[in-house]
Amino acid sequence: MRGMISPSLMCADMLNLRSEIEKLDRLGVDYVHLDFMDGKFVPNITLDASLIKSVKSVLKNMKRDIHIMAYEPQNYFDRMDVGLGDIVAVHYEACEDVSKVLKEIASRGAKPFLAISPDTKADVINGYLDIISGVLVMTVYPGFAGQPIVDGSFEKIAEVRKIIDESKKDIILEVDGHVSWDLCKKMRENGADLFVAGSSSVYSKDVKLEEAVNRMMKLIN
């Protein structure tokens, strides 16, 4: 599978979101990453559900990559208009009935991803391999941009890759957290397919967006 990027809108220019999204779409980016937080599962709030819904109407070629960092994530699916083509990642740690939530995502035509935080062991995904379309490995603690990568993240990516490969299933491995120029290539070497790119790469202050996207694509392919 070729490497794909999912620029994080949390790191974009909030006063010019529409133009930022349209620019990414023109650049041939596969996904736009949309972080939703409830202020409870993580101590922060970013994009709200109505904004995430409105992004859908702007996209032409890109798809939404929705990362829900919230308890009872299914309560937000209607408000986000979750549907065909979307990636929707919910946290293993935030769901009372993980399988039920993942199946509801799939029933809407979206791709269910299981997100696992740094302290959650990789082998928890074994119970959901028949349901999921992807695994989102958090390489920082969820909730805030700009954190350093957590120790052991590369080994965890490799472990998840091994589980996926041994399952013989078509499952995407996504990584989120300090996906920098220096680290993305090593993440790729350890098995990552889809890269959430934020302030340490695509949204670096000293690089134009077009140049940053092209640079990232070259590093992971």
Image (tube, rainbow, N blue to C red):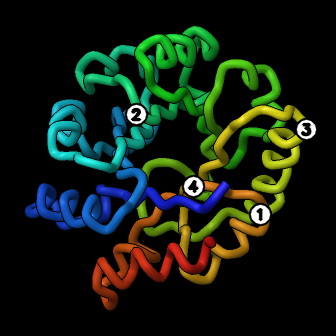
Looking at the rendered image, the disc whose residue lies closer to the viewer, 1 or 2, is 2
The mark found on residue 154 in the picture is: 1
Residue 86 position (above or below residue 45): above
Q: In which quarter of the image is residue 77?
A: top left
Q: Can residue 134 be seen in this view?
A: yes
| Label 4, residues with CA under 10 Å away: few <14, some 14-19, many ≥20 | many
Q: In the image as oriented, which residue stretches furthest toward the right? A: 166
The mark found on residue 86 in the picture is: 2
Using residue 39 as the reference point, say whether residue 110 is left or right of it.
right
Q: Say which amino acid is labelled 3.
A: Glu
Q: Say which amino acid is labelled 1.
A: Phe
Across and down, in percent, residue 79 comes to 23, 21
Do labels 3 and 1 touch, CB within 8 Å? no
Q: In the image as oriented, which residue stretches furthest toward the left? A: 15
| Residue, disc 4 | 194
Do labels 4 and 2 touch, CB within 8 Å? no
Across and down, in percent, residue 164 comes to 80, 39
Using residue 129 as the reference point, say whether residue 64 is left or right of it.
left
**Who is closer to the viewer here, 121 or 128?**
128
| Residue, disc 3 | 166
Looking at the rendered image, the disc whose residue lies closer to the viewer, 3 or 1, is 3
For the point 56% across and 12% down, the residue is: 103
